[in-house]
């Protein structure tokens, strides 16, 4: 390989690292909240009913997702008009403020009703910024990708999230070994949030050095908010179909990561450490399957990969969870979660790049972000929905059925987006 080629590859690697760094913080914070939902419930949402407290905490976790569509439109339009770099720095700043609020606000016992209100506001701010973070990162990666490798490049948007999953879970394992359960519940759960705040300055330094994409700089016309809204209305069918694809991703992701510690501890009655160790392995597993699937979709096309793994998920997710709850153990939880990780990672590796390709180029960030954000208003409530389904039906395997329903949405959406030979040709890998 020539020195020029090596230099170009090194430059691409640095660009990928810089752009996904903020994505890491966004997912790290969401994971930490999910891991410590039980402790957060006791701190901010005390109640005589443990189920009610947990549901309130998980609902606030999900509430952040309700702000994502608004963030997708407002911040997505900002990025499509002003550039990828400026927008990604702005979203990082907003995420940092939201993380800080959750980390330092005193509990309900100290400041009363103000505590849960401020935590909710922090979650809403994080949701607003996250509404465009994933879209901005995915579009940036697709625009700097080398020819024939868009799937592989875009897979690192999700790949950075898996690093956050592993990092957050490892901190959780370490904290659980150092502190007794009562101290973890009273104050230890705040430490991972504070660590997230300490990482922020380094992430700002990394992302400030990000270069604008050549594709955006070469664009002569940069649409304003009115034009973007008009385009979104005229392309509402693509946005809704894209939303259907993402539902499969968000439901499966939050089920196997953020919900696993709560499911393992509260439903399966396994130790907190066991559930967090499983989550570490899930993050590592995701990190393997995502780029492999992205690269596979570069070779065989997005459609075959998406169809195969949605069908496989429909057929196997509920039976797998049913087998787990029949005789809960660490090894069974690990085996089932790794299988679900394989399904998620293999589907999502192709889905992210497919979503960047189906959106009109002039509003690519807004369209991607809106579809993704609308889907997360459903998928982000997966921990709460799973908890409710188990409570309402008495069926501990209900989360597996919820994942199968999400896969049906992904299957239908894929068939709609690729419903004709002409459509398949239009969205084929560049």
Image (cartoon, rainbow, N blue to C red):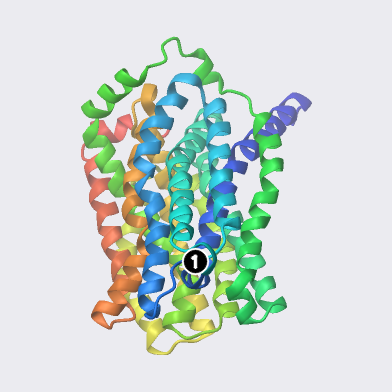
Please say whether residue 86 is visible from this viewpoint. yes
Count how many numbered circles sit on residues in the image. Answer: 1
Query: What residue would you read off at disc 1?
Result: 108
Q: Residue furthest front?
A: 111
Relative to 362, is 387 above or below?
A: below
**Which is more toward the observer, 218 or 426?**
218
Left or right of residue 341: residue 177: right
Quarter of the figure with residue 178 = bottom right
**Which is more toward the observer, 417 or 364?**
364
Image quarter (top left, top right, bottom left or bottom right) of the C terminus:
top left
Image quarter (top left, top right, bottom left or bottom right) of the N terminus:
top right
Residue at coordinates 51% horizontally, 13% vertically from top-left? 218
Residue at coordinates 47% horizontally, 40% vertically from top-left? 129
Picture coordinates of residue 116 (x, y %)?
Answer: 45, 60
Other residues around mark 1 within 10 Å, as few (<14) / some (14–19) / many (≥20): some
Residue at coordinates 62% horizontally, 63% vertically from top-left? 190
> Considering the numbered disc 1 on the image, is that residue within a helix, a strand or a loop?
helix
Picture coordinates of residue 264 (x, y %)?
Answer: 48, 78
Please say whether residue 418 is visible from this viewpoint. no
Q: Residue furthest top?
A: 220
Picture coordinates of residue 293 (x, y %)?
Answer: 48, 51
**Which is more toward the observer, 344 or 375?**
375
């Amino acid at each position: 390989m020539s020195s020029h080629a090596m230099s170009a590859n090194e430059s691409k690697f640095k660009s990928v690292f810089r752009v996904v760094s903020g994505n890491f913080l966004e997912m790290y914070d969401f994971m930490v909240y999910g891991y410590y939902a039980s402790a957060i419930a006791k701190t901010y949402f005390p109640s005589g009913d443990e189920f009610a407290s947990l549901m309130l905490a998980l609902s606030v976790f999900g509430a952040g997702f309700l702000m994502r569509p608004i963030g997708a439109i407002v911040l997505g339009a900002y990025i499509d008009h002003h550039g990828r770099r400026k927008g990604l720095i702005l979203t990082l700043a907003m995420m940092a403020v939201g993380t800080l609020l959750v980390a330092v606000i005193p509990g309900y016992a100290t400041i009363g009703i103000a505590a849960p209100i401020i935590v909710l506001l922090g979650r809403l701010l994080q949701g607003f910024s996250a509404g465009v973070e994933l879209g901005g990162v995915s579009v940036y990666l697709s625009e700097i990708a080398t020819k024939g490798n868009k799937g592989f490049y875009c897979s690192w948007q999700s790949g950075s999230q898996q690093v956050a999953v592993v990092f957050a879970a490892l901190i959780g394992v370490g904290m659980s070994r150092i502190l007794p359960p009562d101290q973890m519940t009273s104050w230890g759960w705040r430490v991972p949030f504070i660590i997230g705040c300490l990482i922020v300055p380094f992430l700002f330094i990394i992302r400030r050095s990000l270069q604008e994409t050549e594709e955006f700089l070469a664009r002569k016309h940069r649409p304003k908010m009115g034009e973007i809204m008009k385009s979104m209305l005229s392309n509402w069918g693509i946005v809704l179909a894209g939303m259907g694809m993402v539902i499969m991703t968000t439901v499966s992701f939050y089920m196997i990561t953020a919900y696993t510690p709560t499911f393992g501890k509260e439903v399966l009655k396994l130790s907190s450490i066991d559930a967090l160790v499983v989550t570490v392995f899930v993050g590592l597993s995701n990190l393997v399957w995502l780029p492999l699937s992205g690269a596979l979709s570069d070779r065989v096309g997005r459609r075959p990969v998406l169809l195969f793994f949605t069908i496989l998920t429909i057929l196997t997710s509920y039976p797998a969870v049913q087998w787990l709850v029949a005789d809960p153990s660490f090894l069974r939880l690990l085996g089932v979660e790794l299988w679900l990780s394989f399904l998620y990672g293999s589907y999502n590796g192709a889905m992210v790049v497919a979503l960047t390709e189906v959106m009109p180029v002039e509003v690519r960030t807004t369209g991607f972000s809106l579809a993704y954000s609308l889907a997360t208003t459903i998928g982000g409530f997966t921990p709460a929905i799973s908890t409710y389904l188990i409570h309402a039906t008495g069926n501990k395997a209900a989360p597996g059925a919820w994942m199968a329903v999400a896969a049906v949405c992904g299957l239908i959406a894929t068939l709609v987006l690729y419903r004709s030979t002409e459509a398949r040709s239009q969205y084929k890998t560049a």
